[in-house]
Image (spheres, helix red, strand yellow):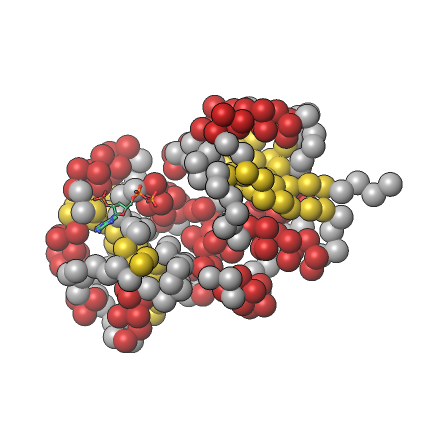
Amino acid sequence: MIHVKKAFVIGHPIKHSRSPLIHGSWIAEHGIAGSYQAIDVAPEHLPAFVERLRQGEFAGGNVTIPHKEAVFALCDSVDPLAKTIGAANTLVRQPDGRIHGFNTDYMGFLGNLDQNAPGWAQGLERAIVLGAGGAARAILVALREQGVPEIVLLNRTTEKAEALAKEIPGPFVPGALADYPNYAGAAGLVVNTTSIGMHDTRFDDLDLRLLPGTALVTDIVYVPLVTPLLADARALGLKTVDGLGMLLHQAIPGFEAWFGVRPAVTPALRAKVEATL
Ligand code: ATR
């Protein structure tokens, strides 16, 4: 009998997740005897679900909103960077049944830039990160791990940027969005981690002309794919990378852990997922 390895994404709600499409495509591409399914798990059922994983029903899976923080307490071990980020989005069942949690968002961020802007970190002296919410945390850890010497963290609510810069060890300089002009001139990278860009929203006062002409602008918002920020950057001739690649790349480490094959983000996969946006 062929042993079918099973993986999942759990969330509540879960029906809009693109993860089944991504992982399902890789399962087919590599001819793996496996499955990947979206399962709606309400918060009160999370402990029982993790127990099913422990008992061997699944090889592992992804965890999304609202479980990314709650799942920590249920894991038997957690990666230190996931702890710093404050969220685990990937679970792997060890052969002895222990559940290990880690976070692949920061790898997804780096993988996306490596694929679409090769060499982006070479000689990079300063990055500006816009936003200090949950999504900013994985980006800050990613840039820190990459060795970026100065990471300026600007947020509408300055106190949140200050608190985050204090909480996460790293070369972080917190400030207000209004401080952007003071830092833009020497910033080789701008990352938007706020929700601005969704639903036709845009930054009121973020003059991209202040950036060096070699700067790279990237957004983690991927609906729409080309946010107003990216459109403005392109119009000025700046390099841009959209947020869809981060979603695709964050899926790689989990797939490799569950199914034993390291998959690739190909133009065909990207096109398939893009068609669903
Ligand atoms: P996520 O987990 O997706 O990061 P979040 O924790 O709610 O979501 O954080 C949203 C981020 O977008 C925050 O940095 C927020 O700024 P505040 O901390 O000041 O709230 C930012 N944000 C959302 N709407 C914004 C707006 N209209 N203008 C400026 N910043 C905004």
Among the 4 quarters of the image, the one containing residue 238 = bottom left
Query: How many numbered circles does the render carry?
Result: 0
Residue 200 x, y percent position in the rendering: 28, 62
Pick whichever, 158 or 190, lies toward us: 158
Residue 42 position in % (x across, y down): 50, 32
Q: Which residue is at a point 87% across and 41% down the rendered structure image?
A: 1
Can you say whether 166 is above or below 118 in the image?
above
Q: Residue furthest right?
A: 1
> Is 102 situated left or right of 226 in this image?
right
Horizontal relation, residue 53 to residue 182: left or right: right
Residue under the image location 15 percent in, 61 percent down: 205
* Residue 249 visible to the viewer: no
Q: Looking at the picture, does residue 207 appear above or below residue 130?
A: below
Can residue 83 be seen here? The reply is yes
Q: Position of residue 158 (x, y in %)?
A: 16, 42
> In the rendered view, does 87 fall on the left or right side of 62?
left
Residue pictured at 33% horizontal, 64% vertical = 227
Residue at 50% from the left image edge and 39% from the top image edge: 11
Please, is residue 183 above or below residue 165 in the view?
Answer: below
Residue nearer the viewer, 84 or 133: 133
* Percent of width and height locating residue 87: 43, 35
